[in-house]
Image: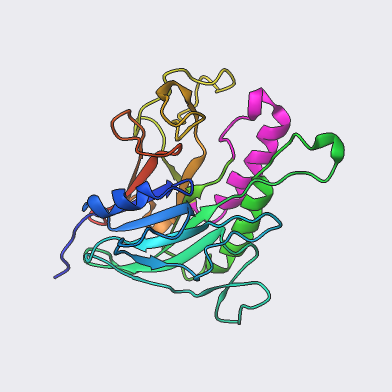
Amino acid sequence: MLRYMTLRLISWNIGQQSEPWRVLVEDDSIDVALLQEAPPPPIGIDLDVIVDGNWQLAGWQARSFAAVIVRCSNRVEVTAEPMVKSVEAASANELAVSRPGSLAVATMSGPGLRAPIIVASIYAAWDRPLSAKKRGWIYADASAHRIISDLSALIDRQEGHRIIVSGDWNILHGYGNHGSDYWERRYRTVFDRLEAGLRFVGPQMPNGQPAEHPASELPANSHDLPTYRTRRNDPTSGQRQLDFVFASETIADSLTVRALNTTDEWGPNDHCRVSIDVDERI
């Protein structure tokens, strides 16, 4: 007889900080962590990290961090499957990634899961346009689209799939920067592509605390929750949601997704944690 239990994933952009690694060690409720902007863990941190060993985000800038997946408890098994390789190095049986360090993938199995689940941690990196006239711009939707293209190899509409994708997308949901229609349309293309194979599962209100001072451009009917603060220790600076979770239809109803964004929950970084509880009794 299958012994059901709730498994907890945490998605978290740790901002190249060391302290979040210690938080993961101390919180025994976490089974798997999907991290972004992760540097190597400090000496003495005993966690099973799934990473290609490079700890670099590919690109012209020197960025010594990566998206990684971490096994935090013995309640689950986490394996580096499918194996992730750069496009030029990947074989036919490996997942080709266009920007190493932006995407980590692993397979999670354990008590209570009807079948293994592929989990993916993503980081949509900021880029700048080539035009000198637009050097003040930064954009991340291009990185998001590269990640979606990489993930498409895992989407099987005929056989079905069991996938959870989470991370820092660095885009806005349902509106554009400062109310820009142009940016709203660009961001919408990311959600539309993802939702062709996965369902957007949050976090959304009421699963988290709304902004104390919502951004002026936030639509009145938005259910977004702040997951990012412009000033790490200032709760009033949390206005925008940049972190989003998507899942296969086969498991989406089994997930409870919540932004851990109250003052007491936020943690030592500019991004809050996003909890993803998996309970297949639902």
Question: How far across and down, in percent of the image, does residue 270 sit?
Answer: 46, 36
Give the image quarter of residue 267: top left
Decide whether residue 197 is among the magenta residues: yes
Q: Residue at x 73, y 36 (%)?
A: 137
Q: Is residue 105 left or right of residue 24?
A: right
Q: Report whether 11 appears left or right of 75.
A: right
Asked if residue 82 can be seen in this view, the reply is yes
- Residue in front for this viewpoint, 6 or 138: 138
- Residue at x 42% of width, y 24% of height: 234
Check the image and name the residue furthest to the front. Answer: 43
Estimate the x, y position of residue 16 in percent, counting from the top left.
48, 49
Q: Is residue 282 visible?
A: no
Q: Identify which residue, 158 or 10, lies in the foreground.
A: 10
In the figure, residue 232 lies in which quadrant? top left
Q: Residue at x 74, y 44 (%)?
A: 128
Q: Nearer the viewer, residue 178 or 51?
A: 51
Q: Quadrant of the N terminus?
A: bottom left
Q: State whether the magenta stretch is mostly helix, strand or loop.
A: helix
What span is colored magenta in the figure? Answer: 171-198
Q: Is residue 232 above or below residue 246?
A: above
Residue 226 in the magenta stretch? The answer is no
- The residue shown at (82%, 46%) is 130
Figure check: 44 above or below 20: below
